[in-house]
Image: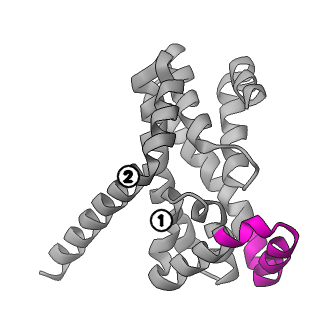
Amino acid sequence: MNSVIQFIYDYGIIAMFIIIMLEYACFPVSSEIVLPFSGAFAASKGLPFLLVLAISVTAGILGTLICYAIGHSGGALLLERIQRKFPKTKKGIDASYDKFDRFGSYAVCFGRMIPLCRTYIAFIAGAAKQPLSAFIGYSMFGIAVWNTFLVGLGYLLCDNWSKAVSYYTRYKNILIPAILLLILFLVANKLKKRKL
Protein backbone atom coordinates (compact mmCIF):
# COMPACT_ATOMS: atom_id res chain seq x y z
CA MET A 1 0.00 0.00 0.00
CA ASN A 2 2.98 2.32 0.56
CA SER A 3 3.81 2.12 -3.14
CA VAL A 4 0.23 3.20 -3.98
CA ILE A 5 0.54 6.21 -1.65
CA GLN A 6 3.92 7.08 -3.15
CA PHE A 7 2.43 6.84 -6.65
CA ILE A 8 -0.21 9.41 -5.67
CA TYR A 9 2.48 11.65 -4.13
CA ASP A 10 4.51 11.46 -7.33
CA TYR A 11 1.75 11.82 -9.95
CA GLY A 12 -1.13 13.55 -8.14
CA ILE A 13 -4.59 13.55 -9.72
CA ILE A 14 -3.62 11.23 -12.59
CA ALA A 15 -2.43 8.61 -10.10
CA MET A 16 -5.58 9.07 -7.99
CA PHE A 17 -7.75 8.50 -11.04
CA ILE A 18 -5.86 5.35 -12.11
CA ILE A 19 -5.78 3.79 -8.64
CA ILE A 20 -9.44 4.52 -7.87
CA MET A 21 -10.44 3.12 -11.28
CA LEU A 22 -8.41 -0.05 -10.61
CA GLU A 23 -9.94 -0.41 -7.14
CA TYR A 24 -13.45 -0.28 -8.61
CA ALA A 25 -12.34 -2.75 -11.31
CA CYS A 26 -11.65 -5.24 -8.47
CA PHE A 27 -7.88 -4.92 -8.28
CA PRO A 28 -6.65 -5.54 -4.71
CA VAL A 29 -6.51 -1.90 -3.59
CA SER A 30 -8.38 -0.75 -0.48
CA SER A 31 -10.75 2.17 -1.01
CA GLU A 32 -10.76 2.68 2.78
CA ILE A 33 -7.13 3.78 2.48
CA VAL A 34 -6.90 5.23 -1.05
CA LEU A 35 -9.93 7.54 -0.85
CA PRO A 36 -9.13 9.22 2.50
CA PHE A 37 -5.50 9.57 1.45
CA SER A 38 -6.59 11.11 -1.87
CA GLY A 39 -8.72 13.60 0.06
CA ALA A 40 -5.87 14.43 2.45
CA PHE A 41 -3.41 14.79 -0.42
CA ALA A 42 -5.79 17.03 -2.40
CA ALA A 43 -6.45 19.20 0.68
CA SER A 44 -2.71 19.63 1.24
CA LYS A 45 -2.34 20.77 -2.39
CA GLY A 46 -5.31 23.16 -2.17
CA LEU A 47 -7.39 21.23 -4.73
CA PRO A 48 -11.17 21.78 -4.51
CA PHE A 49 -13.14 18.97 -2.87
CA LEU A 50 -15.74 18.85 -5.66
CA LEU A 51 -13.02 18.42 -8.30
CA VAL A 52 -11.50 15.46 -6.45
CA LEU A 53 -14.95 13.98 -5.80
CA ALA A 54 -15.87 14.26 -9.51
CA ILE A 55 -12.57 12.63 -10.50
CA SER A 56 -13.06 9.81 -7.99
CA VAL A 57 -16.67 9.15 -9.08
CA THR A 58 -15.71 9.17 -12.78
CA ALA A 59 -12.83 6.77 -12.08
CA GLY A 60 -15.18 4.57 -10.03
CA ILE A 61 -17.77 4.42 -12.82
CA LEU A 62 -15.15 3.51 -15.45
CA GLY A 63 -13.67 0.83 -13.19
CA THR A 64 -17.00 -0.71 -12.31
CA LEU A 65 -18.07 -0.71 -15.98
CA ILE A 66 -15.15 -3.06 -16.67
CA CYS A 67 -16.55 -5.54 -14.13
CA TYR A 68 -20.10 -5.05 -15.45
CA ALA A 69 -18.92 -5.78 -19.03
CA ILE A 70 -17.08 -8.92 -17.90
CA GLY A 71 -20.15 -10.08 -15.94
CA HIS A 72 -22.43 -9.28 -18.88
CA SER A 73 -20.35 -11.26 -21.38
CA GLY A 74 -19.05 -14.10 -19.15
CA GLY A 75 -21.61 -13.95 -16.38
CA ALA A 76 -22.31 -16.75 -13.96
CA LEU A 77 -19.77 -19.10 -15.56
CA LEU A 78 -16.91 -16.71 -14.84
CA LEU A 79 -18.03 -16.18 -11.23
CA GLU A 80 -18.17 -19.95 -10.71
CA ARG A 81 -14.59 -20.24 -12.00
CA ILE A 82 -13.45 -17.45 -9.68
CA GLN A 83 -15.07 -19.24 -6.72
CA ARG A 84 -13.41 -22.53 -7.62
CA LYS A 85 -9.99 -20.98 -8.11
CA PHE A 86 -10.21 -18.60 -5.12
CA PRO A 87 -12.48 -20.23 -2.50
CA LYS A 88 -12.24 -17.16 -0.23
CA THR A 89 -14.26 -15.18 -2.79
CA LYS A 90 -17.31 -17.43 -2.28
CA LYS A 91 -18.61 -15.45 0.69
CA GLY A 92 -18.44 -12.11 -1.14
CA ILE A 93 -19.94 -13.45 -4.37
CA ASP A 94 -22.76 -15.22 -2.51
CA ALA A 95 -23.48 -12.03 -0.50
CA SER A 96 -23.63 -10.03 -3.73
CA TYR A 97 -26.04 -12.51 -5.36
CA ASP A 98 -28.18 -12.45 -2.22
CA LYS A 99 -28.35 -8.63 -2.17
CA PHE A 100 -29.12 -8.47 -5.89
CA ASP A 101 -31.87 -11.09 -5.57
CA ARG A 102 -33.46 -9.28 -2.62
CA PHE A 103 -33.07 -5.66 -3.68
CA GLY A 104 -32.62 -5.75 -7.47
CA SER A 105 -31.31 -2.47 -8.89
CA TYR A 106 -31.07 -0.89 -5.43
CA ALA A 107 -28.45 -3.52 -4.55
CA VAL A 108 -26.07 -1.91 -7.05
CA CYS A 109 -26.38 1.37 -5.17
CA PHE A 110 -26.26 0.06 -1.59
CA GLY A 111 -23.80 -2.71 -2.43
CA ARG A 112 -21.16 -0.03 -3.00
CA MET A 113 -21.04 0.55 0.75
CA ILE A 114 -20.97 -3.06 1.97
CA PRO A 115 -17.55 -4.73 2.29
CA LEU A 116 -17.17 -7.88 0.13
CA CYS A 117 -20.46 -7.18 -1.66
CA ARG A 118 -19.07 -3.95 -3.16
CA THR A 119 -16.30 -5.91 -4.88
CA TYR A 120 -18.58 -8.24 -6.83
CA ILE A 121 -21.89 -6.40 -7.28
CA ALA A 122 -20.94 -5.12 -10.76
CA PHE A 123 -20.19 -8.67 -11.97
CA ILE A 124 -23.56 -9.82 -10.58
CA ALA A 125 -25.43 -6.91 -12.21
CA GLY A 126 -23.75 -7.70 -15.53
CA ALA A 127 -24.48 -11.41 -15.23
CA ALA A 128 -28.13 -10.59 -14.37
CA LYS A 129 -28.23 -8.40 -17.53
CA GLN A 130 -29.30 -5.29 -15.63
CA PRO A 131 -29.87 -2.50 -18.20
CA LEU A 132 -26.70 -0.43 -18.62
CA SER A 133 -28.45 2.90 -17.96
CA ALA A 134 -29.87 1.61 -14.65
CA PHE A 135 -26.50 0.15 -13.69
CA ILE A 136 -24.70 3.45 -14.33
CA GLY A 137 -27.35 5.51 -12.52
CA TYR A 138 -27.47 3.36 -9.38
CA SER A 139 -23.70 2.88 -9.39
CA MET A 140 -23.10 6.61 -9.70
CA PHE A 141 -25.27 7.33 -6.68
CA GLY A 142 -23.68 4.61 -4.51
CA ILE A 143 -20.14 5.51 -5.59
CA ALA A 144 -20.81 9.22 -4.98
CA VAL A 145 -22.05 8.54 -1.42
CA TRP A 146 -19.15 6.22 -0.58
CA ASN A 147 -16.52 8.50 -2.12
CA THR A 148 -18.00 11.65 -0.56
CA PHE A 149 -17.73 10.04 2.85
CA LEU A 150 -14.16 8.71 2.49
CA VAL A 151 -12.64 11.54 0.41
CA GLY A 152 -14.38 14.04 2.73
CA LEU A 153 -12.87 12.26 5.72
CA GLY A 154 -9.43 12.75 4.16
CA TYR A 155 -10.15 16.46 3.59
CA LEU A 156 -11.38 16.97 7.14
CA LEU A 157 -8.55 15.14 8.82
CA CYS A 158 -5.84 16.05 6.30
CA ASP A 159 -2.59 15.26 8.15
CA ASN A 160 -4.35 12.76 10.43
CA TRP A 161 -5.93 10.71 7.61
CA SER A 162 -4.22 7.49 8.73
CA LYS A 163 -5.86 7.89 12.15
CA ALA A 164 -9.24 8.19 10.44
CA VAL A 165 -8.58 4.97 8.52
CA SER A 166 -7.78 3.11 11.74
CA TYR A 167 -10.98 4.41 13.41
CA TYR A 168 -13.02 3.49 10.34
CA THR A 169 -11.51 -0.03 10.30
CA ARG A 170 -12.31 -0.45 13.99
CA TYR A 171 -15.92 0.84 13.81
CA LYS A 172 -17.02 0.01 10.26
CA ASN A 173 -19.39 -2.74 11.48
CA ILE A 174 -21.39 -0.02 13.25
CA LEU A 175 -20.78 2.84 10.83
CA ILE A 176 -21.74 1.11 7.56
CA PRO A 177 -25.14 -0.19 8.79
CA ALA A 178 -25.89 3.26 10.27
CA ILE A 179 -25.15 4.95 6.91
CA LEU A 180 -27.21 2.35 5.03
CA LEU A 181 -30.17 2.81 7.39
CA LEU A 182 -29.98 6.58 6.90
CA ILE A 183 -29.95 6.19 3.11
CA LEU A 184 -32.84 3.68 3.21
CA PHE A 185 -34.82 6.08 5.40
CA LEU A 186 -34.21 8.96 2.97
CA VAL A 187 -35.16 6.85 -0.07
CA ALA A 188 -38.30 5.50 1.65
CA ASN A 189 -39.28 9.03 2.63
CA LYS A 190 -38.85 10.25 -0.95
CA LEU A 191 -40.89 7.34 -2.35
CA LYS A 192 -43.63 7.97 0.24
CA LYS A 193 -43.84 11.65 -0.80
CA ARG A 194 -44.10 10.65 -4.48
CA LYS A 195 -47.07 8.39 -3.76
CA LEU A 196 -48.93 11.23 -1.99
N-terminal of the two: label 1 or label 2? 1
Q: Nearer the viewer, residue 25 or 13?
A: 25
Look at 42% across and 34% down and name the residue there: 152
- Looking at the rendered structure, the kind of residue marked 1 is Cys
Please state if 81 lies on the left or on the right of 89 as rendered.
right
The Cα atoms of the two marked residues, 1 and 2, are separated by 19 Å
SS class of the residue under badge 2? helix
Query: Which quadrant of the figure contains the N terminus?
Result: top right
Whether 183 is drawn above or below 94: the answer is above
Mark 2, residue position = 174
Please state if 63 lies on the left or on the right of 113 as rendered.
right
Q: Tell whether position 75 is magenta.
A: yes
Please state if 111 lies on the left or on the right of 8 as rendered.
left
On the question of residue 120 being in view, the answer is yes
Q: Nearer the viewer, residue 17 or 83?
A: 83
Q: Residue furthest front?
A: 170
User: In terms of secondary structure, what is the magenta stretch mainly?
Assistant: helix
- Report if the CB atoms under discs 1 and 2 are less than 8 Å apart: no
Look at 66% across and 53% down and name the residue there: 24
Picture coordinates of residue 172, whole percent (x, y): 45, 48
- Looking at the rendered structure, the kind of residue marked 2 is Ile
Q: Nearer the viewer, residue 174 or 67?
A: 174
Q: Tell whether position 119 is magenta.
A: no
* Image quadrant where residue 12 sits: top right
Query: Which quadrant of the figure contains the C terminus?
Result: bottom left
SS class of the residue under badge 1? helix
Magenta-drawn segment: 69-91
Disc number at residue 109?
Answer: 1
Mark 1 crowdedness (10 Å alpha carbons): few <14, some 14-19, many ≥20: many
Please state if 18 lies on the left or on the right of 165 as rendered.
right
